[in-house]
Image: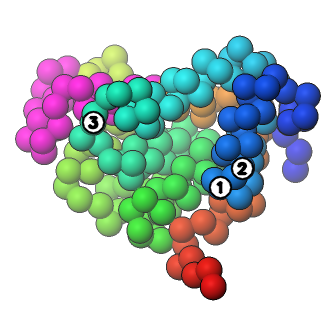
Amino acid sequence: MAARYPLADLNTLPEDLKTKILEVQEKAGFVPNVFLALARRPAEWRAFFAYHDALMDPESVGRTSHLTKGDREMIVTATSAANQCLYCVVAHGALLRIYEKKPLVADQVAVNYLKADITPRQRAMLDFAMKVCNSAHEINDADFAPLHAHGFDDEDIWDIAAITAFFGLSNRMASFSDMQPNPEFFLMGRLPREKKA
């Protein structure tokens, strides 16, 4: 199945996009389709990935956070499932399995995080993220108390909400454009990695 919009040709992209995409390819071993799908509009691509990186890798912008990489990917996986975004569930579920070192967790979180093998802290985090995802207008001060009880501060809570909101945009762009997950994502983190000789 092909996406509704063709993927950009890497060789025709502005140099800054091309350089970043090649760095991702070097690290991952392939180019995730989102990089080429969004590259059809370079200015939007730059804005999207600048915000993505600030949220998902806060150290890259000199900010500390109590959310782990696994926590961040868990938020994306759970809320992307609620938004029925195939691309983001598959791609970020792969990263979740890797960061949490649990081959089943992404499927559990995507289907029903309430029954997933996660900590009470992560459950409180996802309860809040799902409320932001589904009914942000109903958030009130009482919603902060369970998070504070698990050691999240107000900046962490901002992160949970911002990641949820940002990926709400990403989910909708991926879904309307029929962006397809790369086949590589489906197996990542499910089986132990083979050791290089």
Give how far across and how far down residue 56 sits, in percent: 45, 37
Tag 2 or tag 3, which sits nearer the N-term? Answer: 2
How many residues crowd around disc 1 within 10 Å: few (fewer than 14), some, or many (20 or more)?
Answer: few
Is 3 in front, or is 131? 3
Taking the magenta stretch, the answer to whether it contains residue 145 is yes
Tag 3 or tag 1, which sits nearer the N-term? Answer: 1
Question: CA separation, marks 2 and 1?
Answer: 5 Å
Q: Is residue 152 visible?
A: yes
Identity of the residue furthest to the bottom in this view: 197
Identity of the residue furthest to the top in this view: 43
- Please give the residue where the numbered disc 3 appears in the rendered image: 65
Provide the residue span drawn in magenta. 140-165
What amino acid is at disc 2?
Gln
Q: What residue is drawn where x is 39% and y is 48%?
A: 69
Dominant SS type (magenta) = helix
How many residues crowd around disc 3 within 10 Å: few (fewer than 14), some, or many (20 or more)?
Answer: some
| Tag of residue 25 | 2
Give how far across and how far down residue 49 sits, in percent: 59, 28
